[in-house]
Image: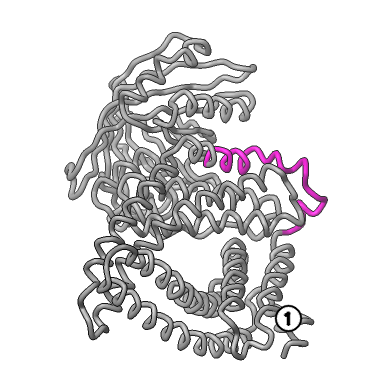
Amino acid sequence: MAHSREELEIKLTGAPADIAALRRSKLFRALRASAPTRERLVSTYYDTKDGALAAAGVSLRLREEAGALIQAVKVATPGGGVVARAEEERALRCLEEFPSAPEGSALAMLAKGKERVTPVARTVSDRWSVTLEKDRTRIEAAFDFGRAEAWRKGRPAAMGPLAAAELELIDGDPKTLFKLARNCLEEGAGRLRISGASKEESARRLRGEGAWLRPERALHLRASATVADALAAALMSTAMRLLEVAPAVSELRLPEGAHQMRVALRRLRAVERVFRDVVDSRDLRKIARRAGRFARALGQARDWDVFLGETLPQVRARADIDEGFDALATRGQALRAKAWDRAVEQISSLAFNEFALDIIAAARLQEWRDEAAARLDEPAAEFARKALDERLEDARRIAVGAEGLAPAALHSLRIALKKLRYAAQTFRALYPHAERKAYMSAMARLQDALGALNDAVVAQDLSSRAAEGQGGSAARAAGFLCGFRAAEADAASRRITESWKAFEEMTPFWRRETGAPTMEARALR
């Protein structure tokens, strides 16, 4: 007998002692509506050898629960992340029935017998759960303590501690769930964090660093999506990416983690701006401003990573002097450590977790509908065409007379292209891959070239800072670096002019239906 439903769940993680303290807090004692239950859960997660289930957003779990075998299939809903997922549970009579994959289910690919599954992760935990009641809303709070295991070739390959609190809406108002989650974060006083990873994903990460920074998933939009659908999906997608990347910043201090988080924060700001003509929400504007503050907190750490990991070694290899570069590197490492301390403090803070929770709430509750224009139910494809046209024309206005653009103008062009690219990435699922591929690639190359120019300017500032108080040899090395990068910036400016001309001649993929340029584009040619 199968049981299907959509789960709405918020998960908090932290040190076992902090999760246990939350369970014993006055907050939960005041809301308790049932006697707590305790049970030992052993959950094994399966996938095909090529990871087809995970790639399709499907989780297959077999749980041993009080002597019974329960198969659970969870499927990510469009724009739902791990907060909202469709779940189907099925009791099995014996192990031989696993996996049960009837036609029409998310496991239909397995029903044909062409694919076999193997265990990829397992969790063993002691669960304490209780039903809470608040404002006529019932919420199940479950606290898990135990271990997570990553499996390889049918056996555990790595393991780590598991401590999590899961808040799942049973019935009632979803707002109450988000309010309770915020109260829990406040109770934890910065020691708890919102998690965007399922137990399976957390366990699989134990197999190696690479899983922490997998490529970002493209935003999924149906062809019939409305403007409201697109905004909600973009908000949830960004929130999930922030939560996914956060441990790579706060726990591993990976340079690529800081970069990917800045990209996600910038995209969030771009999304709010793209939809502002339709949804001019004060709450969304506040979210965008907070995103800017967190992006700036990561900026110095990212800049020093690029300087010490790329710029300094490249320039040193080309220099005819060697004296002074060690001093630049030593001072730079100290400044980078300080910048990373500030960045980790911000991303580990209560404020950041409340920020992530607010984005999820905005995507799920959609209270911005009250401040929206009538165009909210307009097809997303129609809105996308107008929004992308506007951003392309903004870039074209800056690039008029592109011959010999000054550095300040090139910086403005770089920002305008970023806004265009983020908007294009938001709506790209509405267009065939073959039609958008060449245009997106050309835009990425142009933006990378402009980014390299910006990196040259930043490198000159950082080299000067690294040379402060380090003596004459360090000053000479910094002077060589500044001169070298200035020459590179001058050469890059000339290449950018040609690259822009080639890009500007391309037909935007969102205009491929007519093949006609916009009115302003014709005027500029």
Q: State the image coordinates of residue 196 (x, y, percent, origin top left).
A: 44, 42
Asked whether 392 or 495 is in front, the reply is 495
Amino acid type assigned to the residue bearing label 1 in the image: Thr
Residue 105 painted magenta = no
Given residues 112 and 309, the one toward you in this image is: 309
Q: Residue 111, how many percent across, how many down?
A: 38, 50
* Span shown in magenta: 356-379
Identity of the residue drawn at 48% across and 79% down: 449
Residue 185 shown left or right of residue 285 in the figure: left
Looking at the rendered image, the quarter that the N terminus falls into is top left
Q: Residues within 10 Å of mark 1 (few under 14, many from 20)?
A: few
Q: Residue 411: where, in percent of width, then height?
A: 57, 74
Question: Based on the displayed image, in which of its 4 quarters is residue 276 positioned?
Answer: bottom right
The residue carrying mark 1 is 514
In the image, is residue 373 part of the stretch drawn in magenta?
A: yes
| Vertical order, 487 against 455 (above or below) | below
